[in-house]
Each structure stands twice: as C-alpha cells, then as structure tokens.
Amino acid sequence: MIVRKAELSIAKRLAAVAGEDAQLEAKFLLQANGFHSPYQELSETDARALDPLIERRLAGEPLAYILGEWEFYGLPFYVDRTVLIPRPDTECLVEAALKLLDAEHNRVLDLCCGSGCIGIALAACGGAKVTASDISSDALDMTERNARRNGVSLELIRSDFLDAIDGEFDLIVCNPPYLTRADMDGRDASLRYEPELALYGGEDGLAFYRRLANEYTRVLKKGGTLLLEIGMTQREAVEALFSNAECMLDYGGRARVITVKRND
Ligand code: GLN
C-alpha cells in the first residue's frame, strides 16, 4: 500500500476523535514514523506498527503526546504528560512580548514555564535573556531539553510561583493555570491527559493572578511589563486586580492577554 492510501484509511479511523483534523493528524503520524512521501510503499508490518499509536489517539490522548513533540511559534518543542501542550492561542503573548524587547530591556522571567515554549521563543526570536521557573522539576527538565533543542540557554529556577525568584526583570511573561473547578470537572477527554498542576487555577481560576498582583512589583523593574495569558471569560476579573491593565485579543478574537505596565 502507498502512504497516501494509508493516510486516508488512518484518517477515516481518526475522524471520530479528530474531526476535520483527521487527515492532518494521519499525515503527522505517518511522517513521524518516517513516511513522508505520498507514493512511498508501506508494508503490512509498517502499517501494523502504527496501530498502537492510532489506538492511543482513539482513546482520547492528544496527538502531541503521542508524537512527543509539537510546534509553537514555528519552533519544535518536546512534550510529554508532565507539561501542557503549547497552544497557538499563546503565540499572541509571544508576539506582544517581542515588541517590548530591545537591547536594554531584555531580562525576561517566564513564570510557570512548563515546556519552556514562551521563554524559548523569546530567547530564540528576540535575543531575550530568560529566567524560566516552574514548581515542577519535570517541567524544568523539559524546558532544559527544549532550550538545547532550539540552541538557546536559559537560567532555570525551581520555584513555587515567585517564592524563590529574585532579580529585576524588564518583562514577566506567564501562562498560569487558570481553569476553574467547573472547567476541570467538565473538561473533555484530551484535557484529562494534561497535568492538573498546569491547568487548575483554584475554585474560580484566579488564584495565580491574585498572587501575582500582590507580589510582582518585587521582581519587575519600574517601567517593566507583565504579560499574562487569561481564559476568555476572565478579562474583567483580572483587569480589576491590577491598575494599568490592558487586554489584547488572540487571533480568534477572544480576550487572551493582559498587559500591565509598572509605572510606580
Ligand atoms: N488554554 C488552556 C485551555 O483552555 C488552559 C491553559 C492554562 O490553564 N494556562 O485548555
């Protein structure tokens, strides 16, 4: 059988979980296993070797974990179940941060770094000097691997939020856990594979924004900026926690990033 035909038959099987992305997912699975060209021959044994991967996807596991890597801001990142899968929604935070970086303002803290995707994108694309921190040492290991993969080096600090962080940053970027208890209870199968630690933001989803509002001036320079990802219904609640907050929309038109400039 040729790859093209295998792709169509895998796509048919994946349609139940992947919907309109089924064909793209089938292509990614084949490519990750060395089948790039549509007219390459695929033996029965080759095809059967993909079955366990297809079964995992049919059970609801996100494709990113099955492939073990995912793209963010055009860069490759290793991922596993210890870190959140980078989302395209977060790319607008990177875009906004890059506009604020220059040679004199390049000290960045990536707080709750997970896979490291935000900080690494800023180091690789904006020349930022990045400190990345997370409470999870597995996440920090993943950030380190990803930094190496993308040819940048970061300072890594294990910290419960800002507790172990010192220093004066020009920019703090943070995609904290922000799902509410209700979001967690109602989350779909794919989100159940992602770490609760990276998703759950307390009963009302706002716990980390409150902590940040109380503490950020200790580590952000005067004139510096805080860039926070938020859930699409959290704009007003998060704006109310900070003076000077502004909201940016993501490419889907949803409230996604709060920027706070420190003026005092
Ligand atoms: N954007 C993620 C989601 O809705 C949540 C990420 C987070 O909590 N920081 O699935």
Image: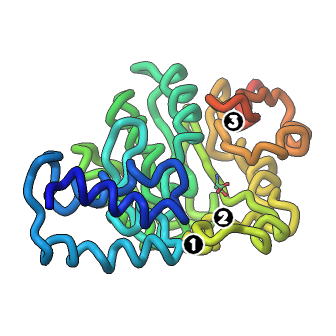
Name the quarter where the N terminus is drawn: bottom left
Residue 257's disc is: 3
* Mark 3 residue element: strand
* Mark 1 residue element: loop
Q: Is residue 100 above or below residue 34?
A: above
Q: How many marks?
A: 3
Residue 130 position, x and y percent, is 42, 43
Could you give the CA–CA distance between mark 2 and mark 1, rounded to whole angstroms? Answer: 7 Å
- Residue 214 shown left or right of residue 164 in the figure: right
Could you give the CA–CA distance between mark 3 and mark 2, rounded to whole angstroms? Answer: 16 Å
Name the quarter where the C terminus is drawn: top right
Residue 60 position, x and y percent, is 53, 72
The residue at label 2 has a CB less than 8 Å from ligand 1 = yes
Q: Which amino acid, mark 2?
A: Leu
Q: Earlier in the sequence, mark 1 or mark 3?
A: 1
Q: Is residue 171 above or below residue 54?
A: above
